[in-house]
Image (cartoon, coloured by chain):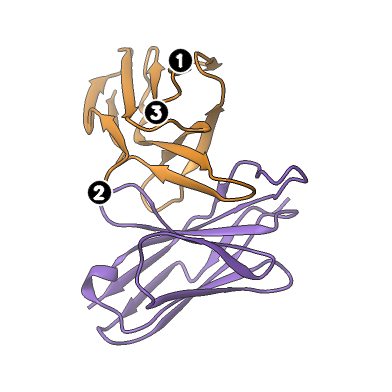
Amino acid sequence: DAGVTQSPTHLIKTRGQQVTLRCSPKSGHDTVSWYQQALGQGPQFIFQYYEEEERQRGNFPDRFSGHQFPNYSSELNVNALLLGDSALYLCASSLELTSGQQETQYFGPGTRLLVL
Amino acid sequence: TQLLEQSPQFLSIQEGENLTVYCNSSSVFSSLQWYRQEPGEGPVLLVTVVTGGEVKKLKRLTFQFGDARKDSSLHITAAQPGDTGLYLCAGAKWSGGSNYKLTFGKGTLLTVNP
């Protein structure tokens, strides 16, 4: 049973560039959430995707955008990178239950982004 | 605004000692989750507590959810070096239908020395 996978594992970019991070959810899961974890901090919620639509969004600027594909995998895009975007980007997947609630989220290993 | 406050932020103890980590909030959560994260890895779920006053045990780890569902604690008995890691609490809120979001604390970095 494959868990949540993310690619790439590490990435180095320069200010102003754009980056795309990828996530494949745990087998059987249909909901993907993205988090940013700066050094020494807990993860902060960026947004969540379900049925190929952004359902909820945290306090992040429009430079952060995403997409979910029919196979439930997801991408996180960040435009016009800033030094402060350097962080571990985590993807978490879960299953939407028929009651409308979700099962627990399971996290991937993350992508470490460094912006120079 | 940090909705979940964890304490202590850092903890360094000797193998065999007991410890308690606290997670406090002024908000009520539908459930609270505890994760353990190792360097360069994603958080791994340890437990989810849902009912106020609930106590769950996972081997040497005991988790408690406050009666008002605003706070939680994690107690480790006879800590071992393998317990070293960042312990994160996360509160879940459902705000109608399928709107669900996890809010994390900053974590407690635990080091257990042999």
Q: Amino acid at mark 1?
A: Asp
**Residue in the picture at 27% in, 84% down:** A14
The residue pinned by badge 1 equals B67
- Which residue, as the protein is rendered here, is positioned at the far front? B96
Residue A55, by quadrant, is: bottom right
Foreground residue, B97 or B61? Answer: B97
The correct choice, above or below, for B24 with respect to B2 in the image is above
Q: Colour of chain B?
A: orange
Q: Colour of chain A?
A: purple
Q: Residues within 10 Å of mark 2 (few under 14, many from 20)?
A: few
Provide residue B12's location: percent of width, then percent of height: 22, 26
Task: Look at label 2 and name its amino acid.
Answer: Gly
Q: Is A111 situated above or below A13?
A: above
Can you identify the residue that label 3 sits on?
B83
Residue B105 as seen in the image, left or right of residue B29: left
Relative image position of residue B56 (x, y in whole percent): 54, 17
- Pinpoint the chain carrying mark 1: B
Give whichever of B24, A1 is nearer the camera.
Answer: B24
Q: Earlier in the sequence, mark 1 or mark 3?
A: 1
Residue on which disc 2 sits: A40
Q: Seen in the image, is B17 located left or right of residue A10?
A: left
Chain containing mark 2: A
Label 3's element? helix
Q: Nearer the viewer, mark 2 or mark 3?
A: 2
- Residue that appears at 37% across and 78% down: A63
Q: CA distance from mark 2 to mark 3?
A: 18 Å
Query: Which chain does the numbered disc 3 sit on?
Result: B
Give SS at disc 2: loop
